[in-house]
Image (cartoon, rainbow, N blue to C red):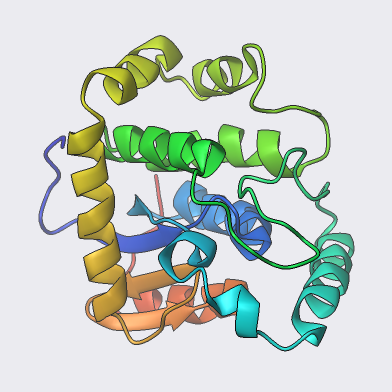
Amino acid sequence: MAGRDADKFSFDLFWSFRSPYCYLALDRILEIERQFDVFVNVRPVFPLAVRTPDFFKNVNPKYRKYNLLDTARMAEFLGIPYRRPVPDPIVQDMETNVIAEEQPYIRQLTLLGAAAQIRDAGLPFLDKVARLIWDGSVDGWNEGDHLLQAMNAAGLNGHALMADVEADPDRLEAVIAENQTAHDAAAHWGVPLMTFRGETFFGQDRINILLWRMMQHGLPERG
């Protein structure tokens, strides 16, 4: 991972590519990074459907209906283009809620995110790839060169990131495992989850509280 000044302001952002609330938080996270001299250490984790697949077997039947309603409403409130991904990053039977054992889409996304994390480029990666998945502009985000173009548009070398995944997936799995260990050590289990100097901030509705806390510590503006 590229070296950073230990005194520079930073916070960890634990992120799932299947979480609509992560996507809905993206613009506000980017605005903080644009306005303030802070490094956002993006740490991709596998979504709950992979980490705890039985969750969806036992969840209250109201969960999915409310989630669909609330995320669409939040996107409308924020003025953010939004649609459930096509295809869903998780292979799941929506009638039975059973999660498939093989998860090629979310594994590819999370490994690519880890490859970007190693380059300290997690936030630019999210800026383009999360939009590709969630903004409704593309069907079949996983097909053709959509992902490659998104990574290149982020200023990254998409071919190099894909080559990293192909050449050494175990290394990237280890990065994700380290992220998940740190996520487990935080004071909440969900995403988006931010940690700053040992304090946990869960949810897209806690971004302003995180900013307030960092400003209490003297967070400097850029320029």
Residue 200 visible in the picture: yes
Residues 207 and 171: in front is 171
Image spot of residue 217 (x, y percent): 28, 78
Query: Could you tell me how many numbered marks the image carries?
Result: 0
- Residue drawn at the location 13% of the way across and 59% of the way down: 7
In the displayed structure, does residue 40 sit left or right of residue 164?
right
The C terminus, quarter of image: top left
The N terminus, quarter of image: top left
Q: Is residue 2 above or below residue 8?
A: above
Image spot of residue 58 (x, y percent): 62, 85
- Residue drawn at the location 81% of the way across and 85% of the way down: 62
Residues 90 and 128: in front is 90
- Residue drawn at the location 23% of the way across and 80% of the way down: 198
Picture quadrant of residue 55: bottom right
Picture quadrant of residue 203: bottom right
In the displayed structure, does residue 207 sit left or right of residue 175?
right
Residue 216 visible in the picture: no
Q: Is residue 64 above or below residue 41?
A: below
- Residue drawn at the location 51% of the way across and 36% of the way down: 104
In the displayed structure, does residue 201 sit left or right of residue 49?
left
Image spot of residue 129 (x, y percent): 58, 34
Image spot of residue 49 (x, y percent): 54, 63
Q: Is residue 5 above or below residue 208?
A: above
